[in-house]
Image (spheres, rainbow, N blue to C red):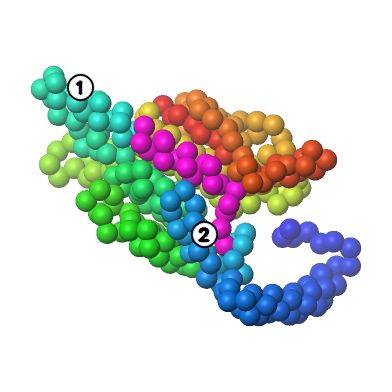
Amino acid sequence: EVGEEEDGGESGSVAAEMSGGKESASEDAAVLAAALAHGVDLRAVTVRESGIAYECNAFSGQKTGFYCDQRENRVFIRSLVSAALASKAADSSALSAKGRQASGGAEGVRVLDLCSHTGGFALNAALAGATEVIAVDSSVEAIVTAQANAAANGLLWDAAVTKLSFVKAEVEKFMTAELVLKKRAAQSGGGEEAESWTPYDLIILDPPKLAPSARSLERAKRKYESLNMAALQLVAPGGILVSCSCSAAVSQEAGLLVKMVSEAAARVGRTVAVLKVSGAAADHPLNPMYPEGAYLTVAFFAVS
């Protein structure tokens, strides 16, 4: 943890890390060579999940290159997008029956995938027919891989159905820029030259581990609340926020993520209702003797 040293001081830690680093590099090289000898390149592995193929680097990528723990949550995103599309289509039909026209963005579903990694949530949203999907991540490698995954699954070539884009940016800066656009649109009025901004119907916020230990929990709480406050201001009324935490320190405190998001909503004048709270996929069994293994919390909120 940054700024905290174990017994032995900084120089001892650095020396141990350097020694361990050499051993680790040697072990990694042996593993890679052994796999290559059997015709398997761990740096370019294809994972197939729920009809989507993902290219990943199982050798040096984050969490062996692919977050298997979010499998069932990714599939649930499809159902949310499909339901939102059906609901908007019904609303549009009702307006048409009354001789009225739906306002801009009223028929489509706009999705924002924050900390998108290699595009898991974004691709599932696109596959379900979302009108526009924007995936944001600070890693160049993750963005490049996500774009390749989209292309490999034929999701970049059907822009008539889904506009899918990938943005390399810090999610905080991206959301700040979106909030500026929202404010400008609100201030410009409704004239012909008015600036436009469309809220998101579904936002997925899946940040990296912000609380690596219980000692860092208080600092992490402030970060989680800040991120969720920004995201909540970008969700359309009646939209959905999916907020994730992969920090065991958060998941170990029952209801903490839901509480943090609820408090964040109150601070920005929004109201949330819990639709569902889930964790890691079924292939991540939990040993009852090791409750700390329940590290992932994923909460789905309806936002008004």
Q: Nearer the viewer, residue 265 or 302?
A: 302
Residue extending furthest toward the right? 7
Residue 136, image quadrant = bottom left
**Residue 145: horizontal and vertical position, in percent?**
45, 65
Q: Is residue 77 magenta?
A: yes
- The mark lying in front, picked from 1 and 2, is 2
Residue 235 belongs to the span the image colors magenta = no
Residue receiving disc 1: 94
Quarter where residue 279 is shown: top right
Q: Which residue is mark 2?
A: 47
Whether residue 58 appears in this view of the structure is: yes
Mark 1 crowdedness (10 Å alpha carbons): few <14, some 14-19, many ≥20: some
Question: Label 2 is placed on what type of residue?
Answer: Val
User: Which labelled disc corresponds to residue 51?
Assistant: none
Q: Counting residues from the N terminus, which is met first, the one under dot 1 or under dot 2?
A: 2
Secondary structure character of the magenta stretch overall: helix
Give the percent coordinates (x, y) of residue 44.
Answer: 52, 70
Instruction: Give the magenta-colored segment's residue range.
Output: 65-83
Res 248 quadrant in image? top right
Q: Is residue 23 left or right of residue 60?
A: right
Q: Secondary structure at mark 2?
A: strand
Q: Nearer the viewer, residue 237 or 116?
A: 116
Instruction: Say which amino acid is labelled 1.
Output: Ala
Q: Residue at horizontal 56%, vertical 43%? A: 244
Residue at the left extreme of this rendering:
99
Residue, x 58% and y 73% (percent of image)? 40
Report x, y in % for residue 52.
43, 54
The N terminus lies in which quarter of the figure?
bottom right
Reply above or below: 100 against 229.
above
Horizontally, residue 200 falls left or right of residue 114, namely: left
